[in-house]
Amino acid sequence: MRLLVFVLLFFLTACQSTKSQQNTIPSPLELKADITVSGRVSTLNHIDIVHVGKTIPDTFSEGKISNSRGYNWWVSKHFALKSDFPEHKVRLYLELLEMSYPHYVELFGMAPANIDKKRIAVVYGSSRSRTREAMLDDGFTRGVHKYAGGETMFYNRAGYSFPSHREHHQRYIVIHETMHAFHMALNGHSTWAPNWITEGMADSIASHVYDPDRKQLTVMVFDRAPMNYILSGLQQYHQGGQPSFEAINDDPALKRGLNFFIVHFLLSDPERYHYFKQFIAKLMAANPHSEATLPTANKLLKATFPNWNKLEQAFAQFVSNIQPTFHIVNGPWEQNGAGYWIRNSQEDEYSRLDIIPNGRNTHPVMDFPTPAKRTLVSVKDDKQLGFKIAFQPEQLARGAIGFAFITKLSQASIDAKRGLISESEVDYTADQLFKVVVVDGVKIQLSHSHHALPEQQIALSPDIKNSLKNHPALGITVTHSNNSLAFRLTTNSATQSFSVAVSSTLSKQIDLQSISLIAKNNNHLITPYLFTHQYPIEKVNTANPWYFEQAPLLGRAFETCDAFKQQLIECEKQLEQIYTLLPEPNKHSTLALHLETQLNNWQRLLGNKALWQLSGIRYQLYFQQNSAYLYLINPSNDIATMAINEQQAVQLRNGEHRIKLHANSNVISLKWRGLEASFQLAVPNEVFDGVILNAKLENNLLVTLTGPYSGASNGTIRVNFIPYSAPSSATLLWQKQVDFKPYQKLLFTIDEFSEQKHNNGLLEIIGEFEVDGETIRLLKHIDL
């Protein structure tokens, strides 16, 4: 099978929407999601969100999701959210999901084929118990797993979330669970992929920074403070004996930190990035069942990446270079944009967040902002350090917030930051800190935990305090020179300066790039400005992590070179030269021209046999309302033409196309830039949608059971008769223990049913199943 031309047999059942629903709910094509995507940063311009009440939208759950008490439905372009939250929360979560959607597509290298007609279903309850109630309504018998913050179910491809007490996690969980639902929408399920893909990719994209003021979401954040997967990954790596990539793939146990490392490792290098896309396409086309997923993934990994030993060495080197910038010594810290605040704390205890940039991070992260013009903070060089404190006006007169210079860390503290020992083994009071904190909104207090430096205080000037009452934001700029620290305080309309003399010993220990944020008894937001740690956002519109707007062009060149490297002898070296220049956006125009020239040369050399690789055209078979369609993507700027069964050819311009198929067997002919290819495509007679229990009367009572997509499944089917005329015990007509396999269809004829004997009553068909780890209760009723 050609790599870029794969068929995903996602056989969906017919849409369940009624005519009235179709009139009530706008289609995905009618709603806008105006989002500027720049690398891994999405900025929301505008999205349409429509409240549709109790009308159930058409989703990839295919009728396997229902209404719930106190819940309402809302739709955006790509998502349908069922929630009992107030409107402002619903809007926030749909905005986050629409901002995440381009990155879901980027990670998998594809979108669900019929996303133009269906939406991805999301359920977000206001509590664990309310979420469990919604899951009971959909046929699940246990609710969300007791150790989970949310769960996406194989049976109906819907993500179920509930809020924790952490605001960061409230956003994280809906991005994470909906990533699973997106994954399942691609071909019906997600168990074709190992843990490091299913959980690693969901955790990676949900590892985010969100700026509510700018409506800006950064995903795939490798190095951050809340929910720090670097720290847990390093602990798992060292405690697990430094496992190899292969060992992590083959381990069915969930180790989130290691999975996180694998995903970021593969996506941090342009060549690995392209091989990873290729591997995902191969694995999904193979579509292994649960028990075959790990060995299939192992085999395909080694078949895809050309030098496995080299890859393993690179992974070990990647992990050895990881040094987390952030370490929450004690919290609870939250993050808004580049600022940090504590959710709550004891009045007598400081919350502490260490920030030590390592200077070697090559991943796109948004840890600190680039100082903007007319800001309260001015950081000109590495001798300066800045902070902006946005006070909660109601809390201005209580608590303390500020920062500390880390003058010395204990060895245990250093080892904990590297993941070599657990947090419980560290006495953090042994660390040496020079603290600078604003106390009760009226003074600054300076102290050192170990040096013989008396505690000093300086009052904020009346002008500063009066200004803070109207504009509660304070800038602090620190300049370090010789044996002195110079402080400049700035508000909207006032300034105040002072200096502090320090000993030569202490002065040598102060590093403006090694700090802690500290706070207690307030929710003020403090934003650090470090000169050496800035993250500019390029003004381009692409989800490519290197901001390369012609990424599809490079993908076509990569696939052509990989498929025909024996004929294109120098192509790998030529691509390596391009990879080295990708991190330089000013070179991108030149790279695009060079790639166009290369592809033209390769076309003359290779001819028709390389049409699929050179064009990058992909196709996928899918069903909508029991009709078969061909979903095609043409990533090139050249028009292709496609004819089906010698009928009139259709023009395929750049972008997506959906073409209805009519015959069981179709001969497809494709032409692109003078090249030609043809193939035969068979359309199955029946659609498939996982586990479905049905019953109907045709002389006898017939019960059918289908599915699942993957995994061993079993359970019990019972048929009861309940009369209308008078109360009596239900009559058990038939009962059977069943074991069913993926894609299997079972048909049962219930001979115990008799139309003469069993009439004027209700037939009740109950199915209770364990489906690939999910417990489901399905009901069907027939009135006689």
Image (spheres, grey):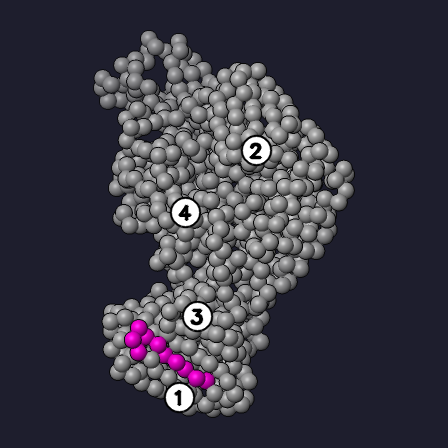
Question: Mark 2 or mark 1, which is nearer to you?
Answer: 2
Earlier-in-chain disc, 1 versus 4? 4
3D distance between C-alphas at marks 2 and 1:
72 Å
Tell us which disc is closer to us: 1 or 4: 4
Q: Which residues are magenta?
A: 485-494
Q: Could you tell which of marks 2 and 1 lies nearer the N-terminus?
A: 1
**Do the residues under discs 2 and 3 have CB atoms within 8 angstroms?**
no
Q: Say which amino acid is labelled 4.
A: Ile
Where does residue 298 sit, x and y in percent of width and height?
Answer: 66, 43
Residue 432: x %, y % from top left: 50, 81
Q: Are marks 4 and 3 in contact (CB under 8 Å)?
A: no
User: In this view, which residue lies farthest toward the left?
Assistant: 726
Q: Which residue is mark 1?
A: 455
Residue 391 appears in the picture as rendered? yes
Identify residue for label 2.
638
> Residue drawn 27% across and 81% down?
463
Residue occupied by mark 3:
528
Q: Amino acid at mark 1?
A: Glu
Q: Residue at x 50, y 85 (%)?
A: 481
Q: Residue at x 47, y 25 (%)?
A: 623
Residue under label 4:
35
| Residue 694 locus on image (x, y percent) | 41, 22
Q: Whole-Å distance between the Cαs marked 4 and 2? A: 26 Å
Judge the density around disc 1: few (<14), some (14-19), many (≥20) Cα neighbours within 10 Å.
few
